[in-house]
Amino acid sequence: MSSKGRSRARYAIDGDAVRYLVEIDVPDGVAVVRDDPVCRVGDEMAVAWDSSGAVLLSHGERGRVEQRGRSMRDALRGSGHHDLAEAIRIVAFPVHETALEELNRCIAVTGRVADLEGRLAHLTSGSGAAPGARH
Protein backbone atom coordinates (compact mmCIF):
# COMPACT_ATOMS: atom_id res chain seq x y z
CA MET A 1 0.00 0.00 0.00
CA SER A 2 1.08 3.52 -0.65
CA SER A 3 2.44 5.33 2.35
CA LYS A 4 0.68 8.49 1.12
CA GLY A 5 -2.89 7.25 1.69
CA ARG A 6 -4.62 6.07 4.80
CA SER A 7 -6.41 2.74 4.78
CA ARG A 8 -9.68 1.61 6.27
CA ALA A 9 -10.88 -1.93 6.82
CA ARG A 10 -14.58 -2.61 7.12
CA TYR A 11 -17.31 -5.17 6.64
CA ALA A 12 -20.22 -4.35 4.36
CA ILE A 13 -23.43 -6.04 3.32
CA ASP A 14 -23.73 -6.43 -0.45
CA GLY A 15 -27.10 -7.97 -1.27
CA ASP A 16 -27.18 -11.18 0.77
CA ALA A 17 -23.38 -11.38 1.14
CA VAL A 18 -21.03 -9.92 3.72
CA ARG A 19 -17.76 -8.63 2.28
CA TYR A 20 -14.51 -7.52 3.94
CA LEU A 21 -13.14 -4.42 2.28
CA VAL A 22 -9.86 -2.58 2.66
CA GLU A 23 -9.91 0.87 1.13
CA ILE A 24 -7.10 3.38 0.72
CA ASP A 25 -7.22 7.10 0.09
CA VAL A 26 -5.95 8.07 -3.36
CA PRO A 27 -5.72 11.55 -4.91
CA ASP A 28 -9.08 11.26 -6.68
CA GLY A 29 -11.03 9.47 -3.93
CA VAL A 30 -10.90 5.97 -2.45
CA ALA A 31 -9.59 2.77 -4.00
CA VAL A 32 -10.63 -0.71 -2.84
CA VAL A 33 -7.47 -2.78 -2.49
CA ARG A 34 -9.10 -5.85 -0.93
CA ASP A 35 -12.62 -7.20 -1.37
CA ASP A 36 -13.18 -10.65 0.15
CA PRO A 37 -16.43 -12.55 0.57
CA VAL A 38 -16.90 -13.55 4.22
CA CYS A 39 -20.31 -15.12 4.72
CA ARG A 40 -23.98 -14.58 3.97
CA VAL A 41 -26.49 -12.40 5.77
CA GLY A 42 -28.13 -14.69 8.33
CA ASP A 43 -24.87 -16.53 9.06
CA GLU A 44 -22.82 -15.77 12.15
CA MET A 45 -19.60 -13.85 12.52
CA ALA A 46 -17.30 -13.63 15.52
CA VAL A 47 -14.37 -11.84 17.08
CA ALA A 48 -11.60 -13.32 19.20
CA TRP A 49 -9.90 -10.99 21.62
CA ASP A 50 -7.50 -11.03 24.54
CA SER A 51 -9.48 -9.93 27.58
CA SER A 52 -6.33 -9.26 29.59
CA GLY A 53 -5.33 -6.40 27.32
CA ALA A 54 -8.34 -5.69 25.11
CA VAL A 55 -6.40 -6.75 22.00
CA LEU A 56 -8.34 -7.87 18.94
CA LEU A 57 -6.94 -11.18 17.70
CA SER A 58 -9.24 -12.31 14.88
CA HIS A 59 -12.51 -11.37 13.22
CA GLY A 60 -14.69 -12.76 10.46
CA GLU A 61 -16.79 -15.82 9.76
CA ARG A 62 -17.63 -17.62 13.00
CA GLY A 63 -16.14 -21.03 12.19
CA ARG A 64 -12.82 -19.54 11.07
CA VAL A 65 -12.56 -17.28 14.13
CA GLU A 66 -13.42 -20.12 16.50
CA GLN A 67 -10.77 -22.34 14.88
CA ARG A 68 -8.15 -19.60 15.20
CA GLY A 69 -9.15 -19.03 18.81
CA ARG A 70 -8.75 -22.76 19.58
CA SER A 71 -5.38 -22.79 17.83
CA MET A 72 -4.16 -19.79 19.80
CA ARG A 73 -5.37 -21.28 23.08
CA ASP A 74 -3.73 -24.63 22.30
CA ALA A 75 -0.43 -22.95 21.40
CA LEU A 76 -0.46 -20.88 24.58
CA ARG A 77 -1.32 -23.86 26.78
CA GLY A 78 1.35 -25.93 25.02
CA SER A 79 3.97 -23.38 25.98
CA GLY A 80 2.76 -23.17 29.58
CA HIS A 81 0.82 -19.91 29.33
CA HIS A 82 -2.50 -21.17 30.69
CA ASP A 83 -3.52 -17.75 32.03
CA LEU A 84 -3.09 -16.17 28.58
CA ALA A 85 -5.02 -19.01 26.95
CA GLU A 86 -7.92 -18.47 29.32
CA ALA A 87 -7.95 -14.74 28.54
CA ILE A 88 -8.91 -15.36 24.90
CA ARG A 89 -12.60 -14.58 24.46
CA ILE A 90 -14.72 -15.36 21.42
CA VAL A 91 -17.93 -13.45 20.81
CA ALA A 92 -20.26 -14.71 18.08
CA PHE A 93 -23.19 -12.77 16.68
CA PRO A 94 -25.70 -12.93 13.82
CA VAL A 95 -24.97 -10.70 10.85
CA HIS A 96 -27.06 -7.57 10.56
CA GLU A 97 -26.26 -3.94 9.77
CA THR A 98 -26.06 -2.73 13.37
CA ALA A 99 -23.76 -5.58 14.40
CA LEU A 100 -21.45 -4.85 11.45
CA GLU A 101 -21.35 -1.16 12.37
CA GLU A 102 -20.16 -2.12 15.85
CA LEU A 103 -17.66 -4.64 14.48
CA ASN A 104 -16.30 -1.98 12.10
CA ARG A 105 -15.70 0.31 15.08
CA CYS A 106 -13.74 -2.49 16.75
CA ILE A 107 -11.50 -3.15 13.74
CA ALA A 108 -10.98 0.48 12.75
CA VAL A 109 -7.41 1.19 11.67
CA THR A 110 -5.82 4.30 10.26
CA GLY A 111 -3.12 2.88 8.02
CA ARG A 112 -0.63 4.92 10.02
CA VAL A 113 1.71 1.92 10.28
CA ALA A 114 2.53 2.35 6.57
CA ASP A 115 4.42 5.54 7.45
CA LEU A 116 6.07 4.29 10.65
CA GLU A 117 9.51 3.61 9.21
CA GLY A 118 9.70 7.06 7.60
CA ARG A 119 8.56 8.83 10.77
CA LEU A 120 11.09 6.93 12.85
CA ALA A 121 13.86 7.76 10.37
CA HIS A 122 13.11 11.47 10.79
CA LEU A 123 13.69 11.12 14.51
CA THR A 124 17.31 10.14 14.02
CA SER A 125 20.14 12.28 12.79
CA GLY A 126 22.14 11.17 9.80
CA SER A 127 21.72 7.39 9.97
CA GLY A 128 18.42 7.20 8.06
CA ALA A 129 17.17 4.46 10.38
CA ALA A 130 15.69 4.60 13.82
CA PRO A 131 17.73 3.10 16.66
CA GLY A 132 16.91 -0.58 16.87
CA ALA A 133 14.96 -0.59 13.58
CA ARG A 134 15.15 -3.90 11.71
CA HIS A 135 14.25 -4.75 8.12
Image: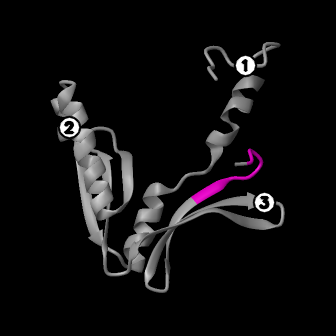
Residue at 75%, 17% (x, y): give it.
Answer: 124
Q: Position of residue 50 (x, y in %)?
A: 30, 43
User: Is 108 on the left-hand or right-hand side of 85?
Assistant: right
Residue depicted at x 22% and y 46%: 70
Apparent side of residue 110 relative to residue 53 in the rendered image (left or right): right
Q: Is residue 6 magenta?
A: yes
Q: Residues within 10 Å of mark 3 (few under 14, many from 20)?
A: some
Q: Quadrant of residue 87?
A: top left
Amino acid type at image mark 1: Ala
Is 64 on the left or on the right of 30, as rendered?
left
Using the numbered discs, state the Cα–Cα distance from disc 1 to disc 3 in whole angstroms: 27 Å
119 to 62, vertically: above or below: above
Residue 57 visible in the picture: yes
- Which quadrant of the structure image shows residue 94? bottom left
* Residue labelled with disc 3: 26
Residue 81 at least partly seen: no
Residue range highlighted in magenta? 2-8
- In the rendered image, residue 50 lying in the magenta stretch gets the answer no
Q: Which residue is mark 1?
A: 129
